[in-house]
Image (spheres, grey):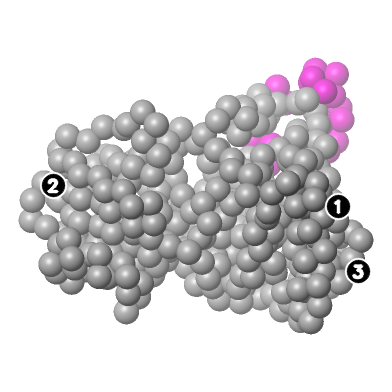
Amino acid sequence: MESLEKVFKKHFQKEPIKIFSPGRINLIGEHTDYNNGFVLPAAINKGIFALIQKNQTNQCTIIADDLAEKYSFDIQKIEIQENGGWRNYCIGIIIELQKTRKLIQGFDLVFGGDIPLGAGLSSSAALENSIVYGLNEIYDLKLTKREMIFISQKAEQNAVGVQCGIMDQYASMFGEEKNVLLLDCQTIKSKIVAIDFLEYELILINTNVKHNLADSAYNNRRETCERVAKKLKKDTLRNVTINDLEKNKTILTIEEYQKAKYVIEENERVLDSVEHIKKDELKKVGALMYDSHEGLQKQYNVSCPELDLLVEETKKHKEIIGARMMGGGFGGCTINIIKKDIKNKVIGTITKEYENRFRKKCSVYKIEIGKGTRIIN
């Protein structure tokens, strides 16, 4: 944070408003959010720091400190850029705010963070939330947190091209320390679920395989689910039961059937996990995580060899009670529930096997559940 403050003051010679917007984990419930299903995410203690202040002009200057990149534009003449990368996330927020007829002028922004990009921790939602939260603050737009997350979601859908659900933005904005959120993506309401990891902790292992959720694979999954729901005369897969699916199996392709079955089963796994968490039955939660990964791998087809190896290796160690791929897929992290006192030895064995198999290193992060987007001192 100190280095970002120095950069901001060097370039803009004024005091900024400081925002922290966290990334998120998702304990279980993958690819269910855009099907109006259930998810079990939490904000984490890694994220994006954004320093922002208005400047009394129509000019905007954004500095991506970690990337050593700078972008300036006239707020009255903005347009989405081809291959714009992080710039389009920023532009998207402004475009969506302008649609609400909220009056904003120029601003100066410096952002950076400790959240690894492309790891499935939703650095994109953290960036989006930090910008809309900051603009809401400096221009007193009087937006609620709920309104802000929908602006962030629309920015990603319309400016970046990822037809994402609401989970990432919601968890990043509303996260609570030491709690996961049982989020109903149909009502966009959540229940706080206190979780005690007892003698275990959460460890993420990053394959360092970069994925891009804007590619056709992610959006194709959503299109397939919507097509199945339409064939079954339902609004979304949230309202489809296993019986509905089995009775109409003949009108579905094998691909449609498997992907829909995964979504329905994953929703049940989320609800079952919550009941086990309430009873401190972490091993049963872990078993459901393994089931989730198998579904993602074999039914939904969004895993990759690197993720599969990391999950399979955990099964050799009784000190690990649950693991699965996390995020959109095709790379990124696995999330693991590992016993605290021997984690280094076990993780060392797994990462060594990964390096031997793929001739590249993976990265390991200990994460804690933290608070959502907020102003910091």
Residue at point 78%, 58% (across, down): 352
Secondary element at tag 1: helix
Q: Is residue 60 magenta?
A: no
Locate the C terminus by quadrant.
Answer: bottom left
Most foreground residue, 359 or 244 = 359
Q: Amino acid at mark 2?
A: Gln
Locate the N terminus by quadrant.
Answer: bottom left
Q: Which mark is residue 99?
A: none
Q: Position of residue 225 (x, y in %)?
A: 67, 31
Snapshot quadrant of residue 288: bottom right
- Relative horizontal placement of residue 213, taking residue 143 as reference (left or right): right
Residue highlighted by disc 3: 318
Q: Amino acid at mark 3?
A: Lys
Callout 2 environment at 10 Å: few (<14), some (14 to 19), or many (20+)?
some
Report how far apart the C-alphas of labels 3 and 1 lie in the structure: 12 Å
Q: Position of residue 327 (x, y in %)?
A: 63, 49
Report how far apart the C-alphas of labels 1 and 2 lie in the structure: 52 Å
Q: Which mark is residue 312?
A: 1
Secondary element at tag 2: strand
Q: Which residues are magenta?
A: 230-254
Callout 3 environment at 10 Å: few (<14), some (14 to 19), or many (20+)?
few
Q: Amino acid at mark 1?
A: Glu
Label pair 3/1, CB-CB below 8 angstroms: no
Secondary element at tag 3: loop
